[in-house]
Amino acid sequence: MKGTNEQRAGLLSGIGAYGLWGLVPLFWPLLKPAGAIEILAHRMVWSLGVVTIALLVLRRWSWIGELIRQPKKLGLISVAAAVITVNWGLYIWSVNNGHVVEASLGYFINPLVTIAMGVLLLGERLRPAQWVAVGTGVAAVLVLAIGYGRPPWISLTLAFSFAIYGLVKKKVNMGGLESLTAEIAVLFVPALGYLLWLGAQGDATFASEGFGHSALLAATGVVTAAPLVLFGAAAIRVPLSTLGLLQYLAPVFQFILGILYFHEEMPPERWAGFALVWLALTLLTWDAFRTVRRTRARAQTRAVQLAAQQTPTAGNSPSPSSAATPAK
């Protein structure tokens, strides 16, 4: 019963995390007339306060000293911070400039980009279904380029920046809260410096657009941290295969919002491009589940074989009487 409750709590946490990420396009327009860079800077500054409070509550500080003594890891953290800055900044700009659907596409194709990077950078070998999925994704980008009249650069930049971010995070090998804190700490000084400079120029919207606007800018810290906390709770309670499926909730919500709430156009060629992307993701999901089932079946078969080898046969097992009789 306890295990079932844990899994249910993990599933709800995962849905909450990806649901919040999917609904966040509703939040960024509320911060106008602040520009994307100002919003991004506030997000970095206020997020550091939120994650610091979380670390104080959890009493997780020992990793800081270890990180400071590892220059290579600090360098990787700086790279991750730079890449996520590009990702966050472009996403905010996209939402506030009428490109929600194109932004959602970036997170749809992110798994395909991650696989392609694994082949090109890590020398990983793909299964046939994965090759078909990647090829279908490339075809989708070409179709969408025709539909948009240009390459879908917003989608590609978001997808590649997040894929690079994931690759760097894998090499850093730190907990989610700890690595996010380190990344935001790297970004804090330049972000705060930009906000102070903006205020000195008289162009800052913080405190000049009323208390409500200032409160919303401060809330960017919670908007950043809350889904990450929920994601962390889900990651330790549900299988990775379940998280892999839940990750599609965010771009699905973003896509629906882009069409139904923001009323962005979807001509037939864009529908065709998205359909190809969804086909590629369906192939990836099917292949992943098939691989997991095969791996589990092989593991179970191997376990049965080992158990059979270790269990003595009835004919070879010593009888109780002979085992109890002392040697003469």
Image (cartoon, rainbow, N blue to C red):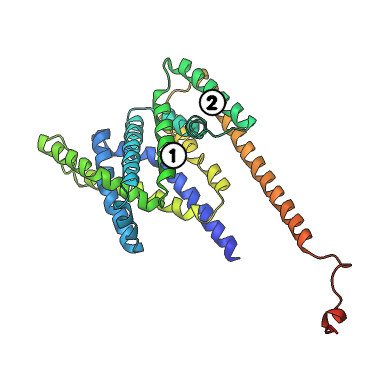
Residue 218 visible to an observer of this rendering: no
Q: 216 or 245: which is nearer to us?
A: 245
Residue 3 visible to an observer of this rendering: yes
Nearer the camera: disc 1 or disc 2: 1
Answer with left or right where residue 70 lies relative to residue 145: left
**Disc 1, SS:** helix
Disc nearer the start of the sequence (1/2): 2
Answer above or below: position of 265 versus 38: above
Residue sitting at the far right: 315
**Disc 2, SS:** helix
Identify the disc placed on residue 226: none
Answer above or below: position of 132 versus 2: above
Q: In the image, what residue type sits under mark 1?
A: Leu
x and y, in percent, of residue 257 in the image = 44, 34
In the picture, residue 102 is in which quadrant? top left
Q: Which residue is mark 1?
A: 167
Question: How far apart, in angstroms, are the residues tagged by discs 1 and 2?
Answer: 20 Å
x and y, in percent, of residue 61 in the image = 32, 60
In the picture, residue 198 is in which quadrant? top left
x and y, in percent, of residue 212 in the image = 23, 46
Answer with left or right where residue 38 lies relative to residue 297: left
Q: Which residue is mark 2?
A: 137
**What's the residue at 43%, 32% (across, down)?**
159
**What's the residue at 47%, 23% (across, down)?**
266
Q: 119 or 57: which is nearer to us?
A: 119
Q: 81 or 21: which is nearer to us?
A: 81
